[in-house]
Amino acid sequence: MKMLRVKIVAPAIATMMLLSACGGSGGSEAESEAASEAASAQLPNGMTIKEQIEARQGQLEKVGDAFKAISDQLKASSPDIAIIQEAAAAVPEATEGMADWWPEGSGPESGVETDALPAIWENMADFQEKVGNMQEAAANLNTVAQGADMAAIGEAFKATGGTCKACHDDYRLDD
Ligand code: HEC
């Protein structure tokens, strides 16, 4: 599995830690300066840390919207299968490449607003396994949704939702 490394961020983080360790007046200003330096560090994919974080949040928001669309239809008295199918197809599409959205330095230490917990980088293998579990379940949901068996769709939806929760419980703030 390819992992992104961001050597360039290390000095900014070291500075940030040094500055916060010093404390005193003006410390927080210097701290946020160091954080914004970290946020604008360039990744090998050409994005800055800030752009990478915002891009993944944008993709996950799409996933959340698709999930809500499916959930709404499953609760409806006469579900619209076309809406379910479109939303089910959007999940694998929006989460393609998700394994690469978490380069070192793109946690809260970047100073960018993020709900990603530092535990991600302490347990990257487990985190990546959870990415894979979700992608597998979402691909299955998409396949099942193309049939019109509502009970099967409901099961596949529930299974996929379980893989979202399994990750959020450990690695996302406030969940
Ligand atoms: C492997 C871990 C993992 C999996 C699997 C996962 N998520 Fe998340 N999700 C996260 C993390 C971490 C964040 C916070 C990202 C950030 O703020 O940088 C997040 C954020 C989100 C957000 C908020 C996005 C925003 O900032 O507006 C939504 C919505 C969301 N996830 C929905 C889902 C759904 C639905 C699924 C399942 C189909 C899912 N996620 C699967 C880890 C995961």
Image (cartoon, rainbow, N blue to C red):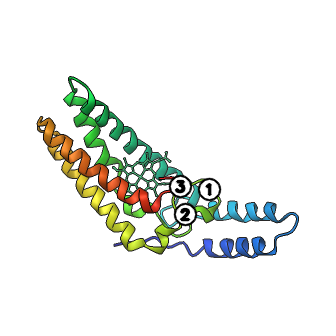
Farthest residue toward the top? 78
Tag 2–tag 1 contact (CB < 8 Å): yes
Q: Callout 2, which amino acid?
A: Ser
Q: Is mark 3 within 8 Å of ligand 1?
A: yes
- In space, the residues marked 3 and 2 are separated at their CA atoms by 11 Å
Q: Which mark is residue 112?
A: 1
The residue depicted at 58 percent of the width and 64 percent of the height is: 42
Frontmost of labels 1 and 3 is 3
The residue depicted at 68 percent of the width and 71 percent of the height is: 12
Pointer 2 residue: 106
Report whether residue 156 is seen. yes
Circle 1 SS class: loop
Q: Is mark 2 within 8 Å of ligand 1?
A: yes
Q: Is residue 34 above or below residue 89?
A: below
Pointer 3 residue: 115
The residue depicted at 42 percent of the width and 72 percent of the height is: 124
Tag 3–tag 2 contact (CB < 8 Å): no
Q: Nearer the viewer, residue 40 or 162?
A: 162
Q: Callout 1, which amino acid?
A: Val
Q: Nearer the viewer, residue 40 or 149?
A: 149
Report whether residue 40 is seen. no
Decide: few, some or many residues near mark 2? Use Cα within 10 Å; few <14, some 14-19, many ≥20: many
Decide: few, some or many residues near mark 3? Use Cα within 10 Å; few <14, some 14-19, many ≥20: some
Which of the marked residues, 2 or 1, is nearer the chain's N terminus?
2
Residue 135 appears in which quarter of the rendering?
bottom left
